[in-house]
Amino acid sequence: GETTAKMALPILATMFILAVTPQPGLTVLAQAATASATNVAVEVVVVEEVDEVADEAALLLELFKSEVNITNSIGMVMIHVPGGYRVAEFETTQSQYQAVMAAAPSKFPGAKRPVEQVSWTEAQAFCHTLTQREQEKGVLPKEFEYTLPTEKQWESYVADAPISQAIVSYIGDRPWTENVGLLSPNKLGLYDV
């Protein structure tokens, strides 16, 4: 059978971050993207001619292969990182998790706090459901999917982060979570790692 590589989004401890991985060899339906200087929002475009569908699919695929940041349908900014992956700028927030899974499992509620109290299986289900929804909306190429990062990917994302910048070091040992984005980003533009 055909083997495909996939990108993943990260998850921290019981919280998680997502990555997007390419799957070569699949096709994409009619889609288009608009870009600003630093970020891209992907939108669905109705295209009637077959040639235009192929052109739009090729453009979306090229966008996802480029180094520009992309914001997905639930507001996650996906940062392009070395190795051809995209990683969520922040951990997955409770509001993002709830928008996809219609569940609020976190012990410490707050829309901008990272989702926690989710198992690996639940995090995988989130990735799968988000991938399906975005592909059905035509805003994620069929060649890409959301996944959890591998150990090697995770280590490359946090390699330059000193322990003093670790989210667990911000206030010391504490019995609650904080809103995402409290700490400075690392050299890749990822927060709270």
Image (cartoon, rainbow, N blue to C red):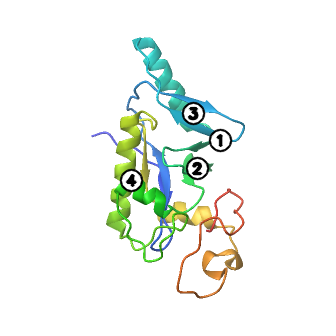
Mark closer to the chain start, 3 or 2 = 3
Q: Residue at x 47, y 64 (%)?
A: 94
Mark closer to the chain start, 1 or 4 = 1
> Which callout, 3 or 2, points to the residue nearer the camera?
2
Judged left or right of residue 12, residue 169 is: right
Q: Amino acid at mark 3?
A: Leu
Toward the left, the furthest residue is: 1
Label 1 crowd bin: few (<14), some (14–19), many (20+), radius 10 Å: some
Which residue does the numbered mark 2 point to in the structure image?
77
Which residue does the numbered mark 4 point to in the structure image?
100
Which residue does the numbered mark 3 point to in the structure image?
63
Q: Is residue 70 visible?
A: yes
Judged left or right of residue 60, residue 82 is: right
> Which callout, 3 or 1, points to the residue nearer the camera?
1
Q: CA distance from mark 3 to mark 1?
A: 11 Å
Indicate which disc residue 39 carries.
1
Question: At which x and y percent is residue 146?
Answer: 43, 50
> Which callout, 2 or 4, points to the residue nearer the camera?
4
Q: Amino acid at mark 2?
A: Val
> Which callout, 3 or 4, points to the residue nearer the camera?
4
Question: At which x and y percent is residue 64?
Answer: 54, 37
